Image: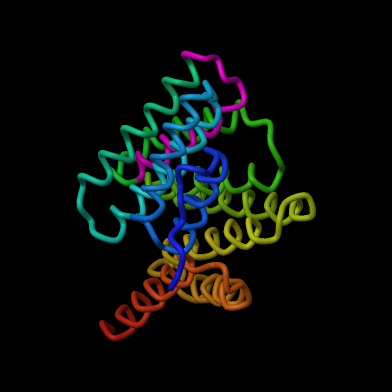
Amino acid sequence: MKKLLDISKLTPKKLHLLGSNAREKDNHLGALQYLDHAIIGYQRENNYEGIVDALKDRTLTWKRFFLLTQDRVFAILARKDAETMLEITKEKDLKNKYSTSYFRLGEVSMLFENYQDAIKNYKKALEVYEGSLAEKGDFRYHLGEAVYRNGKKKQGKEVMLEGLNEIRKGAKKVPNFLIHVWESGCHLRLARLLRVDEPKEAQKYLELAKKIINDDEKLVIRKRQLNEVEKSFLESKKSF
């Protein structure tokens, strides 16, 4: 019989890690449970940076619930957690948390198709960003997607490709898993966006994403997203 995990004996950092790992495995309910306990533990330690980081992961979890169900309640919950991240960052002057807070707000704005607000928040995130070049590229290609969806397709595509180039240039200084997440994510978004206007190029990016995803078994969420994009490509071909 499998021994149950006694979370009361785990540190907030360990609970947070378990929550992040559960989210990456598409175990969203498990992720939320661990993250809730991590936030309470961080609060007891007065670890406000930890709270913001846990809220970041919880925002992503709500976001994925929304994408799976299309229930706007989950998008609202994601927005509230992202707003709370920024409020805590301002209240405690957590200078190294401004960029991620604005970035999550940008992601949430995309859920509501408020592309102008997304662009504003993504730009703020990039203005104050001080981390790795590769993660900056991740931030930048998200900005490019918002610009593209806001009607400036050529400019948006250029920004996305600039972000992809930064991810590749900074790859040696970041764990391979993160590079695979960011690079495959950019390829999938390019495939989605270009499917109608530039079908051949869209197919190219779909194949690039597929290779990365199939070569890394840890990319559970990306595997599901790949299947969704491939399905949309097949449906598009049938309609002609």
**Residue 102 is inside the magenta segment:** yes
For the point 46% across and 56% down, the residue is: 5
For the point 38% across and 40% down, the residue is: 36
- Judge whether 131 appears above or below 29 on screen: above
**Residue 66 is inside the magenta segment:** no
Asked whether 48 or 81 is in front, the reply is: 48
Q: How is the image coloured?
A: rainbow
For the point 37% across and 33% down, the residue is: 117
Residue 176 is situated, as x and y percent measured from the top left of the image, at: 70, 60
In the rendered view, does 32 fall on the left or right side of 127?
A: left
Asked whether 61 or 2 is in front, the reply is: 2
Q: In which quarter of the image is the N terminus?
A: bottom left
Residue 59 is situated, as x and y percent measured from the top left of the image, at: 39, 42
Residue 135 is situated, as x and y percent measured from the top left of the image, at: 64, 45
Residue 8 is situated, as x and y percent measured from the top left of the image, at: 45, 42
For the point 53% across and 44% down, the residue is: 10
In the rendered view, does 4 fall on the left or right side of 75?
A: right
Asked whether 63 or 3 is in front, the reply is: 3
Q: In which quarter of the image is the C terminus?
A: bottom left
Query: Quadrant of residue 212 in the image?
Result: bottom right
Residue range (magenta) = 91-110
Q: Please name the predominant secondary structure of the magenta segment in the image.
A: helix
